[in-house]
Image: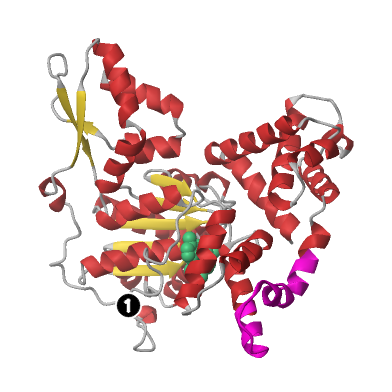
Amino acid sequence: FWLTCLEHFKKELNAQQFNTWIKPLQLEGNNLDHCTEVVIIAPNRFVLQWVQDNFINHIKTMAKSHFSREIQFQLKIADPSTINNKIIRTEKKTPIPAQSERPKSSRRTPSQLNPNFTFNNFVTGKANQLARAGALQVAESPGIAYNPLFIYGGVGLGKTHLIQAIGNSIQENNKQAKIRYVHAEKYVSDVVNAYQHKSFDQFKLYYHSLDLLLVDDVQFFGGKNRTQEEFFYAFNALIEAHKQVIITCDSYPKEISGLEERLVSRFGWGLTVAIEPPELEMRVAILIKKAEQEALKLDENVAFFIAKYIRSNVRELEGALKRVMAFSRFVEQDITLDIAKEALKDLLAVQNRQISIENIQKTVADYYKIKVSEMYSKKRSRVVARPRQMAMAIAKELTTLSLPDIGEAFGGRDHTTVLHGHRKINELRASDPAISRDYNTLMHILRG
Ligand code: ADP
Ligand code: MG
């Protein structure tokens, strides 16, 4: 029965969802033929909650039709004693960092983590839900939940924030844990340094003895063969010792140019999750949160206004908020809608100029190498239909036009066609990395 269930969910869900929520589940006992109550073991409370909220009814229904009787399902969290023996061992002596690694100023901890990046101030929404859930699990059981954890997404979407939040949380639970956050570029220069000083032994001693290694923006490894080789050894050593490895990247592992196949495949061993650009409500929530951190109560209307126009990423959202705050201080007036409009005037002018529907059609057509006229032609072949849906989805995101208006601009199509296109693209973005990448690139181009 359980296998049937797994099969079913595998078909229903995308790989990410399946790996996060369903795959780690286990049944207590293995013969269900005569029992009326079954216990499902979840690895932690996040999975438990999620399965409870989203899947349990479905499982019940399938059980009913499979056994022709009611079966009760109970969810439990895995017994921690079975996990504890694998948890980061702390009694190990703390190895000395390689020469180049010794922190120069006393303010920096050896881990290089920024304490301001926490789960607490990380706003959640559809765009980062899965990534955050994966991150929380890894923070709770490092080396066990998913190894490596691979988080990918465009710039300014919170990758660095999220992985540092994991690092900070693990460090807080275990002061002895030997953690290192390193930007991929810094890792490359460490390798170069070790090369020049013939100090690879020290380099290895340091990196191979960590409890947690966080490598940010791993796309910088592309084409750097020696770095990749060293990283390959470090990665293997850590994973074998059940030490957690966390990686971020601006793209899906297979799409990192100049990355060795053996690394590409290893990056996929654990959990791979995307962070998408935040939707409107989430952008509003982020603005309000960021304002709170500055002890400012931001009016919701103002937050909506900023969020409506600043769509590309969280970093720019923060930038816009800072600008508004600075302007309000400068004119010595509270932040109102007018103040916000005035403060962001230049920024908005640029945006408005760029994002006309014609511009979107042309940009998308160029990107997919089809003719602009095919955006409004009647042709339905896949080669043009998908780009057309992409353009419609983007038009819905980036312009204030109504659905019928957008339909009109695409050769007089019905508004339901626009809606369908938008939904389809959103679905594909979650399941098809190529589409997700196309979407992000196009958004990036169009937002300038
Ligand atoms: P990336 O590493 O993906 O380029 P960062 O992690 O550097 O992005 O995020 C850019 C800025 O946006 C940071 O200041 C970060 O705190 C903020 N940020 C991103 N996502 C969120 C979020 N979900 N909630 C709160 N702040 C966020
Ligand atoms: Mg980053």
Q: Is residue 15 above or below residue 165?
A: above
Q: Position of residue 313 (x, y in %)?
A: 60, 61
Judge by depth and name the residue closer to the eye, 234 or 200. Answer: 234
- Residue at the outermost top position: 68
What residue is shown at x 37% (from left), y 50% (from top)?
Answer: 133
Q: Quadrant of the N terminus?
A: top left
Is 440 left, or right, of 32 in this rendering? right
Judge by depth and name the residue closer to the eye, 347 or 336. Answer: 336
Q: Position of residue 246 (x, y in %)?
A: 38, 57
What residue is shown at x 37% (from left), y 67% (from top)?
Answer: 118
Indicate the amino acid at tag 1: Pro
Q: Position of residue 201 (x, y in %)?
A: 32, 69
- Residue at the outermost left position: 81
Mark 1 burial class by Cα count in 10 Å: few <14, some 14-19, many 20+: some
Principal SS element in the magenta part? helix
**Mark 1, secondary structure of its residue:** loop
User: Within 8 Å of ligand 2, the CB of disc 1?
Assistant: no
Visible in this render: residue 107? Answer: yes
Is 141 left, or right, of 338 in this rendering? left
Magenta stretch: includes residue 448: no
Q: Quadrant of residue 29?
A: top left
> What count of labels does the image hold?
1
Judge by depth and name the residue closer to the eye, 197 or 398. Answer: 398
Magenta stretch: includes residue 349: yes
Q: Quadrant of the C terminus?
A: bottom right
User: What's the magenta region?
Assistant: 324-350
Judge by depth and name the residue closer to the eye, 149 or 53. Answer: 53
What residue is shown at x 20% (from left), y 25% (from top)?
Answer: 72
Q: Position of residue 288 (x, y in %)?
A: 51, 68
Visible in this render: residue 224? Answer: no
For mark 1, what is the residue? 110
Colour option used: secondary structure
